[in-house]
Image (spheres, grey):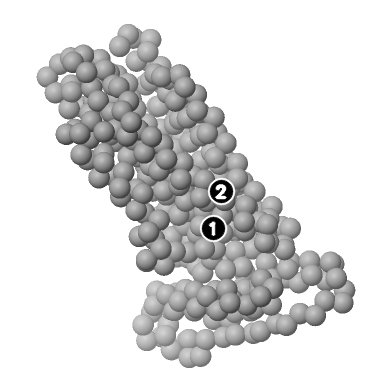
Amino acid sequence: MNVMTATYYIETNLICIIILLLLKHQTKARSEQESRDKQLFSCLLLAAVLFCVADIVAGICRGQVFEGARAIIEISNLLYDEMLAIVAWCWMLYVFRKIGRIFSGKVYFIVSLPLILFTVLAISNPFTSFIFSLDQSNIYHRSYGVYVHWIVSWFYLLVPMIAVIYTMAHEADKARRHELTPFLYFIIAPAVASGLQMYFYGLTTTQVGITVSVVMVFLAVQDGQIGQIHVDALTGLNNRRGFASYIDYKILCNTEIKLTILMIDLDHFKQVNDLHGHVAGDRALVYAAEALKKSCECVNGRPYLCRYGGDEFVIA
């Protein structure tokens, strides 16, 4: 690899790494309730950083012949593919939490199966050359298995986009729909960048697209545009402010609307906190929220479910 090409790989990825690490440093949970979302976003950032590091190593070592070069090139390219799939996987989990759809253990395992399958294929690639192969000059060549990588990565990017579109289509609150809009933009930059990289072999742009989208989402979250205004961070349900906006919207749309409102609270909830601590209390609230969500799925008319405050819930 000539000096100009090596410099291009290093500079492009280093700029992305610096930006991603700065964002990771700023990603600190302000409360226990926010920690799960922050952990997912932090994992996404870390995977993106490793993705860039792998691209630097793979790019610099491509076509080099020295002791251990083949193993380094093999590992860096496998890490590159695996981290891209993990970035997309983390994004899907993050989006589903932000729109209030938290997976159960069984569903979590099912949606993780494509990533597990690809990981197995990646680990076996040195023996099968299913995803890519290296010739005698240590030059990388795509194999048919690379399509599996693309399918898995795009699956994890497209599914949350479809979920957001569905949620927005069934969301009565205009402000809430506005909150969800940035999630639709995330896929644009990686789509353009990866499309260029797939078409122009040797071009490295995917990490730039990912970094641009991550920065955009981070800024939207910091500004309170995503998930902070009308969503309860612990349970993923609508919050009190969202409920007030929902009522205002219903009144504006129809002054003669007939609305049934159920006020629900958890019996003896204070004893859970006093005897077992607030962490156990938080788990109890999450379990209660999941039970209420399952109950609402059986009701016609798209009931509005919210955590009103403390151990109090509202269904409209």
Q: Residue furthest front?
A: 144
> From mark 2 to mark 1, how far is it between C-alphas?
12 Å
Q: Amino acid at mark 1?
A: Lys
Which dot, 2 or 1, sits closer to the camera? 2
- Give whichever of 132, 217 is nearer the camera: 132
Q: Residues within 10 Å of mark 1 (few under 14, many from 20)?
A: many
- Give whichever of 133, 69 is nearer the camera: 133
Left or right: 185 as drawn, with respect to 127:
right
Left or right: 265 as drawn, with respect to 119:
right
Residue 244 location (% of width, % of height): 72, 70
Residue under the point 65% across and 48% down? 181
Residue under the point 42% across and 85% down? 272
Residue under the point 44% across and 64% down? 103
Residue under the point 42% across and 23% down? 204
Q: Amino acid at mark 2?
A: Met
User: Which of the two discs, 2 and 1, labels the residue nearer the N terminus?
Assistant: 1
Q: Residue furthest left?
A: 67
Quick check: can you spot residue 23? no
Q: Would you name the residue on which mark 2 appears?
A: 161
Residue 92 location (% of width, % of height): 47, 51
Label drawn at residue 98:
1
Label drawn at residue 22:
none
Q: Which quarter of the rendering shows the C terminus? A: bottom right
Q: Check the image and report above or below for 155 versus 130.
A: below
Q: Quadrant of residue 229?
A: bottom right
In terms of secondary structure, where does tag 1 sit?
Answer: helix
Q: Residue furthest right?
A: 255
Residue 151 location (% of width, % of height): 42, 40
In terms of secondary structure, where does tag 2 sit?
Answer: helix
Q: Which quarter of the rendering shows the N terminus? A: top left
